[in-house]
Image (cartoon, grey):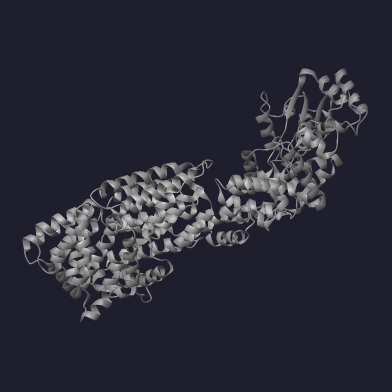
Amino acid sequence: MIADLRAVVAGREADAGRPPAAGTHGHVVVEGPGGTGKTALLAEVADGYRAAGLAVLDAVADPTPNVAAGQFAVVVDDGQWLPAATLDRVRHLVADGSCRVAVACRPWPRPPALTALVQALGGDRRFVVLGHADRATVQGWARELLGGPLPPDLLDGVVSSTGGLPSLVVPLLRSLAHPRVGIPPEGRLPVPEQVLDAVRAALGGLGEGTRALMLAVATGAPLETEVLAELLAVVPTRVGELLGEARSSGLLLGSGAVVPLAARVLGETAPPELVRDLRRRLLGLLVERGDQPTVLARRLAADGVRDAGAARLLERQADVALRSDPAAARELLDAAVACGAPATAVAARRSQAAAQSGDFDAALQWADTVLCDNTSPDRARAAAVAATVLAHRGLSAHSAALYRLAGPQRTGAVALALLSGGSAAEAQAALEAPREAAEIPTLLAGCEELMARGVLQSLRAGEHAGADITAALSTLSRAAALLEPVGRTALLHETPSALAALVALHCGELGVAESVLERAVAADTGGAPSRARHLLLLAWAAMLRGRLNRAREHLLRAQDPEHRLEPRDDLYLQALDVGLARRSGDAPGLAAAWARAREALLRYPIELFSLLPLGELMIAGARLGESDRIAPDVAAAQALLARLGSPELWATPLHWSGAQAAILLDDPSALRPHAAALVAAARTSPYAANLARAGRCWLQVLTGDIDAGAVEATAQDLAAVGLTWDGSRLAGQAAARTVDPRARTALLSCARALAEAHDLDAAVSPASPVAAGPGPTAPCRLSEREQEVARLVVAGQTYREIGGRLFISAKTVEHHVSRMRQRLGASNRSDLLARLRLEIAQGG
């Protein structure tokens, strides 16, 4: 360690590469706080004097040297504590030129006799300043003592806990070298008792006032004379003396912090009631002068100290945090209650913080306690929180009533809740109701009103419907821009980004939907309650495009393990599972997803903004032969649209789903109303016109009346409005059913071109893995194309369906199956299926 101390000297003394005593006879002054290694360095200097042939005398033990002048050196350790007479005697020896002197001392105190001795050493002295070791130095010591470097997190623990004080660092490192201790896992730092004893000894050597000052600083007091003087009940000049002694001990760092191990010992040895009283008085002093000592107030709360000042401070800080950090606001409000704030007084804010954090159950519980108290001054806040939660759970009428209770500022939210439930006239009346002149609209109020007006614009029908849809998108985009400054913590019935995306998804503007949603995700608009919503809608857009893998990625991101999805978001998630399974040809997966989706549909009533999931379930229900199970929900959706005037924008995708379901069921009577609605909407909506043509073309394909040119044109039209997967599938199904080889080739080329141009994912579902027997598994004997065919065969698809999905003919599928049967040695179909499952499992 001495060699390292020499390195420290070399780093701190500009004109010396090593301690001077090792090769010269000069005077030396070593200065540094306690525990920095002055005594060790002084011993090296003494060895240097001896190596030069000088006798080394101790200033205290050898008061009268019996050595000839010039033949001895005097060592003075802890010069700050020595009597003036001893220091004067050494100074006289220096003045006579009789000896060399090495002095070690702390920077405080500096008695006059010590100052005089240092000055007497003159220009022939070397001045060495020691201090706390930095991270690199501690790592060097670790290499020497442990034979290798410390892990970074453990090294940080050693440096931070000891403050780099060598007298603590060295024994701590030595304890890690002990075989019974060793380097602990995961950076946990055990502190041996001998190190704590060293800290206790150092603290015990300080005056009572200095220990009190260090306890105050460890408690959170700033190093400011006025605060410390009042806190310790001493005169300001005394504070300076106490600070000098504390810094000189090495236990008070230059940053103003107490060495953490010293703070730990002080906290353990001081009476708890003294520490609590000190914190309370310090809090009062800091608050009185205008500070916001939140950390100190939270410590009082953690100790269960009831203090009105701390409670008020925590409440104020929670109000600030509600605008930026809901999780922190919840903690602050909990701490305020622990400090004595009435739980009823902060219940509404706790409800808001819980809702903003995504904990809707807790939000409802707190809000209900306030709503039950008609005298509560914060009842409007609680009503707004409860209204938002109920909106996410599909209770639109209750949500609208609570938004009304929240006050006139939430008129836009009232209108949105009414619109989602199908009450357009009431929503319009709410927006047009006269306002009080003194009412100042907030950003949130303005945003909600714009959202409601945007949805109303989207409901209009007639020859200007297209322009109204464009206007709706513009209005909703302005609402999103207005919300951005406060959007992360705004509690909303629905975000403007989600509404704009829904409008875009309903009119085939998938690029617009993805753009607005990606911006919302990046800005975290709506915070925790809306994150899943935006990601699920992004997944929906990707699914419509046929980018199934990307849709699954969004789907996974939307599922937070810490919070279960609310019923509205869960309905979208389950419907996405259904849609992805259907598009992947995963029959078992589709059946399982269908059961979960039906359960989700029971928990969330049909409203305007949940028509997309219902449409997907209509198609899946027809595919599974269970359309009757959701017939009441379909009837409810049709009734809702009728109450809203059958708006073309919102009704068109549902009619398209209904048409597809009817085609699958081969039910012309069920197809007729949907086809008529699409044809009627086609007069004013290009999107509806495309879907109407696609419906007619699908029906013709299923009946065998295939016009390859018309199919190609229709497939291209579907791709143009974002329904690329549907267009590619239409072309593939037509190719599988046509008997004209040229038409089949053209249609397969069209299907492939759409898939390649729009990055469609392969519509292949993984087979259920089969447990292999003991021992290593053999590599799969099927080619990549054969594995694709095998998965679809195992999933129960016909050759024609497989051909449509893989853009090959049914004859080619049959050829692949025949080759696989021969290669695998299957005797019959059931044997082939079993062998295919095993091959797929082995092939990954």
Q: Position of residue 412 (x, y in %)?
A: 45, 50
Quadrant, the C terminus:
bottom left
Q: Is residue 721 above or below residue 63?
A: below
Q: Classify residue 760 by image quadrant.
A: bottom left
Q: Is residue 185 above or below residue 447?
A: below
Q: Position of residue 644 (x, y in %)?
A: 33, 58
Quadrant, the N terminus:
top right
Q: Is residue 87 above or below residue 222?
A: above
Foreground of the two, 677 or 48: 677
Q: Position of residue 722 (x, y in %)?
A: 25, 53
Residue 581 appears left or right of 47: left
Foreground of the two, 567 or 129: 567
Foreground of the two, 768 or 26: 768
Residue 512 appears left or right of 369: left
Q: Classify residue 64 by image quadrant.
A: top right
Residue 103 appears left or right of 391: right
